[in-house]
Amino acid sequence: MSEIIVETENSIQTITLNRPEKRNALNDALINALKGALADANQGENLRAVVIRGAGRDFCSGADLSALQKIAESDVLENLRDAENLMELLAMIRKIKIPVIAAVQGRALAGGCGLATACDIVLASKTARFGYPEVKIGFVPAMVMAILRRNLSEKKSFELITQGFEFSAEEAEKYGLINRVFDDESFDADLKNYVSVYEKVSRSAVILSKKLLYQMDGMTFETALETGAEVNTIARLTEDCQQGIARFLKKD
């Protein structure tokens, strides 16, 4: 059975984690398959957004038992290579040109919660559950922390990573960790409707906006403004902007 299922409808691609019997737990094969699918999506000239979701009842429950066994039996260099594989996946999501959206149903825990957090947008069903329980087994959600700290306040980030408790989708939305909560019964329809927005807005403008937003991390205010001015100039010269201005002027 393939670790992932890739489906494309119009200009939206859905990548489904396909280990439902393991609650879509992460292992090397799944991580590598996901990296490959994202790299392919980045080359798709007609794609507007990528949705990552899980098969079965859960989004992703983190590392599976075989992966944990591998950690326990490996030396420092082997563990570093393993950690870097996940690091590459999390970094890749931000480097993909188009929006990457996590569609969370069921549980998103540990590395699974980290995977969702790494996405540009997180949508969840009302009964979804989140958590970073790594601390309970002496582990640290170290790489995810780099993303979490950019999404939440210092106090809330500290609480989530040092207490390891599960929290609901509604709590996650209140924290600012996810964008929207949809009813379980209408989740698929609401997801499709939400993502369809990217079929109606400028692809080039979204690509430039995503790149600029993440580039601004760590910039001084002046540098961010200067970089923004450069991107603004580039945007003006794109075909989408030229056509958009022409339509606007014609309307007047």
Image (spheres, rainbow, N blue to C red):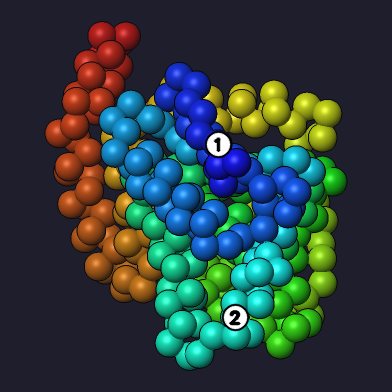
SS at mark 1 in the image: strand
SS at mark 2 in the image: helix
165 over 119 or under it: above or below: below
The reply to whether discs 2 and 1 touch (Cβ–Cβ < 8 Å) is: no
Position of 26 with respect to 171 (left or right) is: left
Q: For mark 2, what is the residue?
A: 71
Residue situated in front as seen by the camera: 82 or 116: 82
Quarter residue 226 falls in = bottom left
Residue 5: mark: 1
| Residue 188, x across and y down, in percent | 70, 28
- What is the three-letter code of the residue carrying label 2? Ile
Q: Residues within 10 Å of mark 1 (few under 14, many from 20)?
A: some
- Residue 152 visible in image: no
Which residue is at 22% across, 48% downward? Answer: 231
| Residue 125, x across and y down, in percent | 77, 41
| Residue 103, x across and y down, in percent | 64, 42
Which residue is at 48% across, 38% downward? Answer: 50
Quarter residue 175 falls in = bottom right
